[in-house]
Image (cartoon, grey):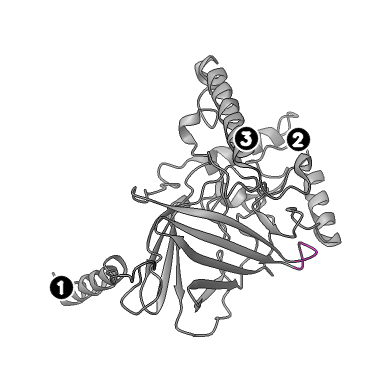
């Protein structure tokens, strides 16, 4: 092995060891575990799936939480609906059962978060604030341009940058639940958190995206990135992460946020097995006011698996070929 290769290998090993092997100190009775530098130990693999909808249903206006009996009934109704859908899929022809209709792909939440009727906690009505006039107009124009076009197809006459609201996921740039911010979705609702005294790392299972976040007080850099530029700090026992300088939209809300979003995320250990994740979205070009949602993250023993989005991925060529064929369906060359 050449010297520079050996140096690179050893350096990588030391860095990986720091991230993976920071031991927990013995916690005082009644306290959560802490790292050797005295901060709350948030490390582990956390699942953020939830049966609670992002917004409060109209039928539950004014009802912030359900009783234990109401929550159990909600969860059972949800399980019955999913079982009925799966039974219908199993009885369908094989060609109709290949793809997202097969329940084995999914890990939807089965339990409500704290028996709440919405993940949104601010505004208090549990609803996402209205869009701004410019965002409303922009979405209407894009919807009109894409009328009759599938969710993973280019706008007629468009190209790769014009794959619609799910385009970033189709191109394997960002995962649909990793955002940032992270939000429960159909599957891969897992994130692994690593800590050192001056950095934290959030490794999302969806698209195996890693956000390496300094927590040593350094300033933001003026470099626009797909997942923004993040800086963290401790507010008591809560890890706070501020993110700005987004390249454009993220996968959050199917591309609903814009490049001017300022995101504040908070991670608080509330029990040995759970974190509370809170995200405040401040995007004045998209929503008329900032808004906040919360979701529980439960620790799991399973590892984070590789999400090999690009492995054997011929989808882009097929998508574009199909779009060209559709544009030429009138017989033109």
Q: Nearer the viewer, mark 1 or mark 2?
A: 2
Whether tag 3 and tag 1 are in contact, CB under 8 A, the answer is no
Image location (x, y in percent) of residue 7: 20, 76
**Is 137 positioned to the left or the right of 122 in the image?**
right
Q: Which element carries disc 1, helix, strand or loop?
A: loop
Q: Nearer the viewer, mark 3 or mark 1?
A: 3
* Residue at the spot of label 3: 74
Q: Residue furthest front?
A: 29
* Residue at the spot of label 2: 148
Magenta residues span 284-289
331 or 264: which is nearer to us? 264
Q: Quadrant of the N terminus?
A: bottom left
**Is residue 333 something that shows in the picture?**
no
Image location (x, y in percent) of residue 191: 44, 56
Circle 2 Cα neighbour tier, 10 Å, few/some/many (<14 / 14–19 / ≥20): few
58 or 222: which is nearer to us? 58
Checking the image for residue 2, the label placed there is 1
């Amino acid at each position: 092995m050449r010297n520079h290769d050996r140096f690179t290998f050893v350096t990588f090993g030391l860095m990986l060891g720091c991230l993976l092997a920071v031991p927990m100190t013995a916690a005082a009775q009644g306290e959560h575990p802490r790292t050797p530098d005295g901060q709350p130990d948030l490390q582990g693999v956390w699942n953020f799936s939830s049966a609670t909808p992002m917004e409060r249903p109209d039928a539950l206006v004014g009802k912030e939480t359900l009783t234990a009996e109401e929550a159990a009934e909600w969860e059972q109704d949800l399980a019955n609906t999913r079982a009925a859908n799966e039974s219908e899929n199993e009885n369908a022809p094989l060609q109709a059962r290949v793809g997202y209709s097969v329940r084995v792909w999914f890990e939807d939440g089965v339990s409500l978060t704290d028996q709440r009727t919405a993940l949104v906690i601010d505004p208090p009505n549990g609803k996402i604030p209205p869009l701004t006039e410019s965002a409303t107009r922009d979405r209407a124009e894009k919807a009109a341009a894409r009328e009759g076009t599938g969710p993973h197809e280019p706008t007629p006459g468009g190209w790769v940058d014009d794959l619609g609201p799910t385009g970033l996921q189709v191109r394997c740039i960002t995962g649909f639940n990793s955002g940032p911010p992270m939000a429960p979705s159909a599957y891969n609702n897992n994130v692994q958190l690593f800590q050192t005294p001056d950095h934290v790392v959030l490794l999302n299972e969806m698209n195996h995206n890693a956000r390496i976040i300094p927590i040593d007080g350094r300033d933001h850099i003026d470099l626009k990135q797909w997942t923004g530029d993040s800086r963290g700090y401790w507010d008591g026992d809560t890890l706070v992460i501020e993110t700005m300088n987004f390249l454009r939209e993220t996968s959050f809300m199917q591309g609903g946020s814009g490049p001017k979003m300022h995101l504040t995320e908070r991670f608080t250990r509330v029990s040995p097995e759970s974190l509370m994740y809170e995200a405040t979205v401040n995007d004045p070009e998209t929503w008329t006011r900032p808004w906040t949602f919360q979701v529980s993250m439960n620790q799991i023993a399973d590892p984070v698996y590789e999400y090999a989005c690009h492995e054997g991925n011929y989808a882009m060529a097929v998508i574009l070929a199909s779009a060209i064929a559709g544009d030429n369906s009138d017989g033109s060359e």
